[in-house]
Amino acid sequence: MKVVVAQGCGFCPGVRNAIKMAQKTLAKHKNVHSLGEIIHNKDVVKQLAQAGLKITDNVKNIPSGIVIIRSHGAGEKELKQIKEQGLKIVDATCVLVKRVQKIAKMLHRQGYKVVIIGDKGHPEIRAVIGSAPNITVIGDKSDIKKLGKNQKLGVICQTTQSPEHFAKMLAHIVKSSFSELKVINTLCREAIKRQTCATQLCKQVDIMFVLGGLHSANTKKLAELCKKHNIQTFHLQNYKELDKSILRGKSIAGVTAGASTPQWVISEFVSNLEKFESPKKKK
């Protein structure tokens, strides 16, 4: 089977930095904890756990040692609690996520009602919510009613959202009641580049594969966008999850991967896919 890999897929700089920091810390210290999974990829999380990284979602469960702040960041309350417990912090927060947090604080100081477009349950959003009081999260059109009336609105966006979704939600906000509107683009250029390359590729192949964690926001977004252009799009974590029956009758496959997907997962998938030969029809 012919396999075409999208440009710029796999680890983004923020994820690569977070993993390096975790590996470096684990090499020097034994009692190392992560406040939530470093990144949303079970293969990488498993490797780090085998190296000694302990994962917890509650600071109170960490009696001593070092706490790594994952790439998605942490809220101010959590950071304050970590310091109060006398724990050492290794901050692996993505610089772009930190920028979103700083902008949220700035907008609040300027008197704006801070609004962030994104997925409410995502760790990046939860961390940003802790940056300023009463931040409103807009996930879809139904959330617009939360904004109230005649307020100064300062709008930002989760870094991994698509430009299309950002624009769509902004259009709904513009139709609502407000006295002033300030919008700051906080989208990740790396994520946009990957989305563009993936959607272009999926239109040119028989079947499209998006590799990455099932809970990874940017990977799910890639799969969602590709599915719109190619119904034969499949979101898998690795080659083990591939059902070969879906390859029958296909000759060209496209492959992309989320920002938290390691290169070895991509290489293994592509290598095995290239070896696949569709059974010939019986005469």
Image (spheres, rainbow, N blue to C red):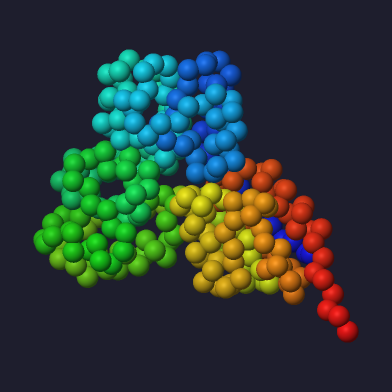
Pick the quarter of the image with the N terminus: bottom right
Determine whether, in the image, residue 96 is placed left or right of residue 81. Answer: right
Identify which residue is drawn at 34% across, 31% down: 58
Determine whether, in the image, residue 34 is placed left or right of residue 168. Answer: right
Count of marks overlaid on the render: 0
Identify which residue is drawn at 51% across, 52% down: 214
Instruction: Give x and y (percent) for residue 54.
Output: 48, 27
Q: Nearer the viewer, residue 148 or 142?
A: 142
Identify which residue is drawn at 27% across, 43% down: 129
Query: Does residue 98 show up?
Result: yes
Instruction: Give x and y (percent) for residue 128.
Output: 31, 42
Query: Does residue 157 show up?
Result: no
Determine whether, in the image, residue 239 is placed left or right of residue 85. Answer: right
Identify whether 214 is placed above or below 109. below
Identify whether 53 is placed above or below 203. above
Residue 133 lies in quadrant: top left
Determine whether, in the image, residue 258 is placed left or right of residue 268. Answer: left
Identify which residue is drawn at 35% across, 67% down: 168
Q: Nearer the viewer, residue 81 or 192?
A: 81
Q: Nearer the viewer, residue 220 or 278?
A: 278
